[in-house]
Amino acid sequence: MSCCGDSQPSKSRRPGLVVLDEPVTGLHPADVQVLVDAFDVLLAAGNTVVIAEHDLHLAAAADWLIDMGPGSGAAGGTVLHCGTPDALPPDSGPTAAYLRRLHAH
């Protein structure tokens, strides 16, 4: 018996939409991959996962990226890229530069 509900997902449950705002805030960097793995389980079950996040390790794991900028606050607000992380133009801003360095290692 579980006080929080059945620990096994219902076979009749339909896929849904999961929206998260900065879910890795406060996590140790080593725990980000654990969260990415949990998102993969949600995706494999047919769910759509939308995440607003500044952590670029998580952005690198995304299958679709919307990069806003070029700066923060009043210097931002422009969509610099909307597509796969691999298709991010190399000169589009700081996100592209960071992801290039991340993939080089």
Image (cartoon, helix red, strand yellow):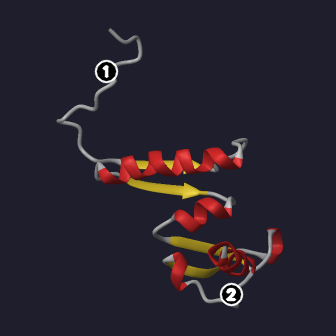
Q: Please tell me whether residue 53 is drawn above or below residue 85 in the rendered image.
A: above
* Label 1 sits on residue: 6
Residue at which label 2 appears: 92
| Left or right of 59, for residue 6 | left
For residue 31, the mark is: none
Q: Residue at x 34, y 24 (%)?
A: 7
Q: Of marks 1 and 2, which one's residue comes earlier in the chain?
A: 1
User: Does the rendering let one see residue 33?
Assistant: yes
Please indicate, yes or no, whether residue 23 appears anywhere in the rendered image.
no
Q: Which residue corresponds to the image point at 29% horizontal and 53% vertical from the top-left?
A: 46
Q: For the point 82% across and 73% down, which residue is it?
A: 74
- In the drawing, does residue 72 fall left or right of residue 37? right
Are the residues flagged by discs 1 and 2 in contact, CB closer than 8 Å? no
Q: Which is nearer the eye, 43 or 14? A: 43
Q: Nearer the viewer, residue 37 or 88?
A: 37
- How far is the residue under mark 1 from the one under mark 2? 46 Å
Where does the image place residue 59, in percent across and percent down from the top left? 59, 65
Q: Position of residue 12 (x, y in %)?
A: 17, 36
Residue 27 coordinates in the image, percent (x, y):
69, 42
- Given the image, on which type of amino acid does mark 1 rest? Asp
Going by the image, does 84 lie left or right of 79?
A: left
